[in-house]
Amino acid sequence: MTKAQDLIAEAFEIPVSEVPENAAIGRFEAWTAPRHARLFEMVERTLGRGMTGAEASAIHSIKTLQVVLDDAEGTET
Amino acid sequence: MLAMGLASGESGARFFKAAKMRIRNSPYIIALRHTPDESCEIGTDRFLVQTLTAEQLSNDVFEWLNDKDVRRFVSLPPGEIGTVEATKLIQNHDNNRSFLFWVTPQDERDRQIGFVQLQINPIHQIAAVGICMGDQGWKDKGAVSEARSAVNDFAFRKLSIQKLTATCQQGDAEGLWSMHSEGWVREGVLREHFATPNGRIDIIQYALFRDDWIRKIDDWAAKRDAKEGGSE
């Protein structure tokens, strides 16, 4: 389980087990616009700041979300 | 006049009745009428996406055009928008190289719920697409995708545009979602590009290419044909 998978499950209000490893907008039906907006807010809360345009537009799959989270963590340390 | 006729009843019904077949195998357009320099109407499954005069706009339009939440992520002239401002806005579009399409639900022909703008650069055969779905009753019902895809299809296959571009503001989560769900490709980020009351913000630029679009349409048509063949 990854941090990205956790965040998606929480934002979408579904069990982590229901988040596919290859979840992406357009491929995972549960990834709707309102849920994306909630995920957006949760990512910003996790980062403790607003996202840049590059980060915001990179969130379209579980994989790219994890990259955003990892990069932000790497920048902070 | 054409647009008014279609929007208001009998001739509109004829327009759609005549269009039993989708336009050139389009998953998005069921009827199309373009008179260069005059008007353009695109029929989709649920909407009439049409150019209109300011006098043809319903009062609802001015409500959502002046709503601060709607305007948050849309570039519109500053200040209150009334008939005079709407007229200027519409007159900036010649229905040849630039279009301002208003989105009218087919079963509610007396009001418009949003608009789609198409600005063409004929030298490079590219065009910029902008969209605003102002009526909150249509939020999260696929209206953005349906209206924009119809305009995209018109641009690619009727006007032979080779590449479409669109932009999205960094804080517009639902706008960004729609770009990705429709298959737009991120081309780059214009950093601190727009000035807003909350400071300068990034703009994300997206693109769609004609070849990719045609491939998508062909795939759709092949699947439809296979399905229809299978059901016989």
Image (cartoon, rainbow, N blue to C red):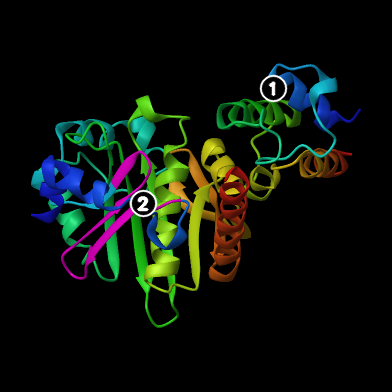
Mark 1, secondary structure of its residue: helix
At 39% from the left and 53% from the top, the residue drawn is B29
Q: Which residue is mark 1?
A: A11
Marker disc for residue B24 = none
In this image, B36 relative to B226: left or right? left
Task: Note whether B152 is above or below B169 in the view shown.
Answer: below
Q: Nearer the viewer, residue A29 or A5?
A: A29
**Residue A4 sits in which quadrant?**
top right
Depth check, mark 1 against mark 2: the one in front is: 2
Q: Residue furthest bottom?
A: B123
Q: Chain of mark 2?
A: B
Amino acid type shown at disc 1: Ala
Structural crowding at the residue carrying mark 2, measured as other residues with C-alpha within 10 Å and reported as few (<14), some (14–19) or many (≥20): many
Q: Is residue B46 magenta?
A: yes
Q: Which percent across, then down, holds residue B163?
A: 51, 70
Crowding near pointer 1: few (<14 within 10 Å), some, many (20+)?
many
Q: Nearer the viewer, residue B8 or B23?
A: B23
The magenta-colored residue range is B28-48
Q: Is residue A51 magenta?
A: no
- Disc 1: which chain? A
Along the horizontal axis of the image, is A27 left or right of B15?
A: right
Q: Is residue B77 visible?
A: no
State the residue in front, B9 or B73: B9
Residue at 71% from the left image edge and 35% from the top image edge:
A28
Label drawn at residue B30 = 2
Image quadrant in which the N terminus of chain B is located:
bottom left
Residue B117 placement (x, y as % from top left):
34, 55
Coordinates of residue B131 in the picture (x, y in percent): 39, 48
